[in-house]
Image (cartoon, grey):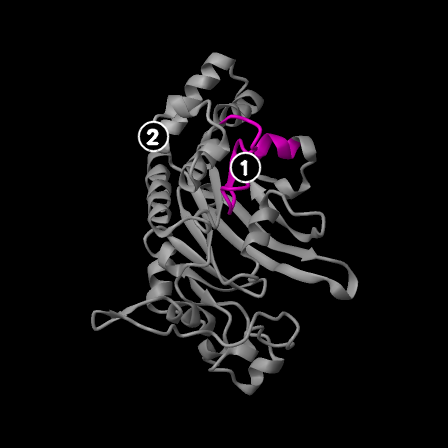
């Protein structure tokens, strides 16, 4: 794709937590493009570096986290070089984020209306009447029942699903170009999860959003994402068009994630899920980070790090099983 079709370009993004011997590289040389009006999914189990990558894009890391290398290009500028005032003009305005837990993402001392109007005052400089009108419109867009009546409600008066709809409304308030959704359905029950994901999908089509969807659930990305990145131990180990990646995975870790999904066999739900043995470790080997957990590991995997290479058009992976030399 040409440069004009790229909304966000991430190059060699490297993020580390802690200092000295206790430091951990949470995101290691992360590189990808987000195209205009595309949904890009980033998947992997807990500890793979998904959220660290998402938070790094807007420099929202906790004090223990530090970006040590890389660039994030947006509107022809590297926003990692921005000062606080410049960042403030981007966050919640041109790039918005929906966080994991709707229970803790809203201010309990402010009404729903106040929280939606806040970015409208800050970024769009709307007066109170216009901001209120826009806030009610947003609550209607995210399908919150009785949107005008909910303006005076406090977060504790809403269910988890309603809170998440409010958070999405806040994120969309200033019509951003990019929306980053970090595990947006994790704390919700299955029915509400499906409703929220359907809402994201319809909103994306309606307002021409480019979206980064962070999730551990490959079932979620199947119906929503155009492309998918698979992360393991802070690295991207596979990327490609979503359906191709799901149907023809190139990395054993992706295969493992797919096998962990609940399935029905002969009309009956399988009793025991296939699991990936062990846990994520970033210090086991100089070779492939997945070596100690991989059932297909070879001797060279322990000492030689596989390159991240394209195997078919648009579909890349870092695994010696794909080496044809």
Please indicate whether residue 285 sits to the left or right of residue 172 in the image: right
Residue depicted at x 68% and y 62%: 24
Q: Position of residue 283 (x, y in %)?
A: 66, 73
Nearer the observer, 162 or 296:
162
Residue depicted at x 47% and y 74%: 276
Would you identify the image quadrant in which residue 151 lies? top left
Label 2 packing within 10 angstroms: few (<14), some (14-19), many (20+): few
The residue to which callout 1 is attached is 75
Closest to the camera, between mark 1 and mark 2, is 2
Q: Position of residue 166 (x, y in %)?
A: 45, 33
Provide the secondary structure element on which disc 1 rests.
Answer: loop
Range covered by the magenta-colored residues: 86-111
Nearer the observer, 65 or 86:
65
Q: Is residue 213 above or below residue 173?
A: below
Please indicate whether residue 220 sits to the left or right of residue 126 in the image: left
Q: Position of residue 68 (x, y in %)?
A: 70, 53
Q: Position of residue 289 (x, y in %)?
A: 58, 73
- Residue 96 lies in magenta, yes or no? yes
- Residue 141 lies in magenta, yes or no? no
The residue to which callout 2 is attached is 145
Provide the secondary structure element on which disc 2 rests.
Answer: loop
């Amino acid at each position: 794709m040409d440069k004009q079709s790229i909304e966000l370009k991430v190059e060699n993004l490297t993020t580390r937590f802690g200092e000295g011997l206790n430091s951990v590289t949470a995101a290691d040389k992360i590189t990808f493009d987000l195209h205009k009006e595309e949904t890009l999914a980033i998947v992997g189990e807990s500890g793979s570096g998904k959220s660290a990558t998402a938070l790094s894009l807007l420099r929202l890391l906790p004090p223990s986290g530090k970006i040590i290398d890389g660039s994030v290009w947006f509107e022809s500028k590297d926003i990692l070089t921005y000062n606080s005032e410049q960042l403030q003009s981007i966050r919640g305005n041109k790039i918005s984020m929906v966080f994991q837990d709707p229970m803790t993402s809203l201010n309990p001392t402010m009404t729903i209306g106040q929280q939606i109007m806040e970015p409208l005052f800050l970024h769009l400089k709307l007066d109170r009447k216009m901001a209120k009108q826009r806030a009610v419109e947003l609550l209607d867009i995210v399908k919150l029942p009785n949107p005008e009546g909910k303006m005076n409600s406090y977060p504790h008066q809403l269910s988890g699903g309603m809170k998440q709809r409010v958070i999405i409304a806040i994120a969309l308030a200033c019509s951003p170009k990019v929306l980053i959704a970090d595990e947006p359905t994790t704390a919700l029950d299955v029915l509400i999860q499906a409703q929220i994901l359907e809402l994201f999908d319809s909103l994306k089509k309606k307002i021409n959003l480019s979206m980064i969807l962070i999730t551990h659930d490959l079932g979620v990305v199947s119906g929503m994402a155009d492309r998918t990145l698979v992360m393991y131990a802070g690295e991207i180990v596979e990327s490609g068009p979503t359906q191709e990646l799901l149907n023809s995975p190139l990395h054993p870790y992706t295969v493992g994630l797919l096998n962990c999904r609940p399935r029905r066999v002969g009309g009956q739900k399988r009793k025991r899920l296939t699991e990936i043995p062990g846990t994520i470790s970033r210090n086991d080997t100089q070779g492939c980070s997945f070596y100690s957990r991989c059932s297909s590991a070879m001797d060279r995997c322990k000492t030689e790090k596989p390159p991240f290479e394209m195997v078919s058009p648009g579909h890349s992976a870092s695994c010696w099983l794909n080496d044809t030399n």
